[in-house]
Amino acid sequence: MSASRRVQQWLTFTRQWWLFDAKWQDPFESAKVINKHLKGAHKPIFGGHADCGDHVVVINSQDIAMRGDEWYYRVYFHHTGYPGGATWTKAWELHKKDPTMIIWKACYRDLEKDLTRRGRMQRLHIFKDSNIPKDIIQNITDQIPQLRTVPKRLKDYSQEEIEKFPKLFDYPKEHVLD
Amino acid sequence: MARITSPLWFGLKNLISKPAIGNLRVKPHLTLTQKSLSTTCACKVKQITVNEVDDKIVIEGKVVPSPREKYLAKLPTNPTGCKECPLCRLGLTVRHTDVLIISQFVNSKGKQLPREVTGLCREKHKRMDYLIVMAEKAGLIDREVERKVVHNGLTYYEPEEWDEPHFHKYYDETVIDEFLYSRRKRH
């Protein structure tokens, strides 16, 4: 067995730590990728009896993006148990109170509903900023690639970059600039 | 079909008989009186500047060399399909995050330039219209859009601008095909 194959075998039987940057990411698309690593479904020994799940550290959860007006029509339901105790909170209201909540709920909902769910959720660590405590950041070995590229605003480009970008058409002679 | 200069003239033509029109004093056509005759382009102006110098307002039209002349993209000489539109010739599929391309089709106030200036085909022009709105709503470009509407003494706002904070949004461009080519069922 070569050295690289041996390391691969060690990694399958340990709990690895993955980093995921949630900046401009859809929480419901990224929950599927995170859950794959929480279950250990990317490993060859994955099966019903194998406890091979990994840790995932999610950062920048306050900068997640949702499609269109989904912030305003996605609603989270909660009932206290008492009569008249039902509440409906919109996604932007929930995100204002706790910016880590939406990703947590998306992962919790996407996992299988059995006894393994609580244990797997314990291995998910969500932070709203990029400030991670030292005892967590020293474990991280690799990162999960982002699903969509982070867009850049027009303000963030310099004036030279905007001017020198290739133009698709020229103004006609009788054009009045405004 | 003759040009209709005013609704009054249009009404008279149909209602009153021809000799009666002759007795009325109607404005002459605007062709000779107001339009100036010129051999060169009458409005060959690039930039209009307005300066206020004590008790005087000076409006000046300057011919300015266009800033885009140096950086024009090379379009293919033998295109397939649409031969006029620059987007079709290059075969570009523009997304709403391509801010540097979208900002070329927009004037300083953020309004879309007309088709005679940009040279886009009708389909791409409409598609670009949607892309500009998407980029503006995602907060990638800035526009001077009036969200407040005053009507009958009441003010109306767009729902996004009430109290909610502006979180990150993204859009899916495949929706544009739905808008353009298929009737959408709304409930």
Image: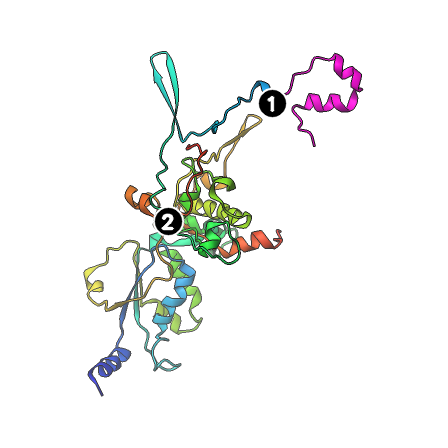
* Residue B36 higher or lower than B179, as above or below: above
Q: Chain of mark 2?
A: A
Q: Position of residue A99 (x, y in %)?
A: 35, 52
Q: Position of residue B132 (x, y in %)?
A: 46, 45
**What stretch of residues is rendered in magenta?**
B1-29
Q: Residue at the location (66% across, 28% down)?
A: B3
Q: Pick the residue in front: B19 or B141.
A: B19
Membership of B26 in magenta stretch: yes
Tell me, for residue B31, which label it has, or none.
Answer: 1
Q: Quick one: label 2, few (<14), some, or many (20+) residues within 10 Å? A: few
Q: CA distance from mark 1 to mark 2?
A: 67 Å
Q: Quick one: label 1, few (<14), some, or many (20+) residues within 10 Å? A: few
Tell me, for residue A44, which label it has, or none.
Answer: none
Q: Residue at the location (75% across, 15% down)?
A: B22
Name the residue that disc number 2 marks. Answer: A97
Looking at the image, the residue that sits furthest to the bottom is A1
Colouring style: rainbow
* Residue B119 higher or lower than B36, as above or below: below
Badge 2 marks a residue whose secondary structure is helix
